[in-house]
Image (cartoon, helix red, strand yellow):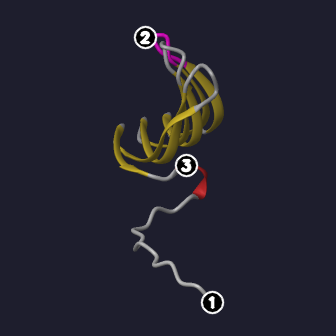
C-alpha cells in the first residue's frame, strides 16, 4: 500500500497515517491500548524521528526524537529552551 490508510494491530493499537511500499512510513498517529497516542514520524514500521506522546487527558507527556521505535532524545515542549543562568547581581542606578 502507498498513501494514507488505517491499520489495526492484534494488540489493539491503531495506526492512522502514511504508508509506503506496504510499510508504515511518514507522518501518522498510533493509538496505544492504554489510551495514549503517539503523533509524529514513522520509518520502516517504527516510530522514528520527531514525535510526541499524548495521554488520555490530552497532555503531552513525552516529546522528542525516536529511533527504530525507541525514545532517544527529549525535546522541550512548547519551544522553550533551557540554558544555564548566572546569578545576577543587584545594582542600583
Dot 3 or dot 1, earlier in sequence: 3
Tell me if residue 34 comes above or below residue 80 in the rendering: above
- Residue at image point 58% right, 85% down: 92
Identify the magenta region. Answer: 8-13
- Residue at image point 53% right, 84% down: 91
Dot 2 or dot 3, earlier in sequence: 2
Tell me if residue 11 comes above or below residue 71 in the rendering: above
Per the image, the residue denoted by label 1 is 93
Mark 3–mark 1 contact, CB under 8 Å? Answer: no
Where is residue 30 shown, x and y percent of the image?
Answer: 54, 27
Along the viewing direction, whichever of 19 and 72 lies nearer the viewer: 72
Does residue 56 appear in the picture of this structure? yes
Instruction: Assess disc 1: are there few (<14), some (14-19) or many (≥20) residues with their C-alpha within 10 Å of its C-alpha.
Output: few
Asked whether, in this view, residue 65 is left or right of residue 18, the answer is left
Quadrant in the picture for residue 40: top right
Closer to us: mark 1 or mark 2? 1
Per the image, the residue denoted by label 3 is 77
Quadrant including the N terminus: top right
Amino acid at each position: 500500500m502507498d498513501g494514507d490508510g488505517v491499520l489495526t494491530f492484534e494488540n489493539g493499537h491503531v495506526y492512522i497515517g502514511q504508508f509506503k511500499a506496504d510499510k508504515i512510513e511518514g507522518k501518522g498517529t498510533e493509538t496505544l491500548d492504554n489510551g495514549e497516542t503517539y503523533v509524529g514520524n514513522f520509518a520502516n514500521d517504527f516510530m522514528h524521528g520527531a514525535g510526541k506522546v499524548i495521554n488520555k487527558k490530552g497532555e503531552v507527556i513525552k516529546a522528542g526524537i525516536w529511533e527504530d521505535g525507541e525514545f532517544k532524545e527529549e525535546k522541550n515542549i512548547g519551544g522553550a529552551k533551557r540554558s544555564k543562568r548566572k546569578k545576577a547581581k543587584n545594582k542600583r542606578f
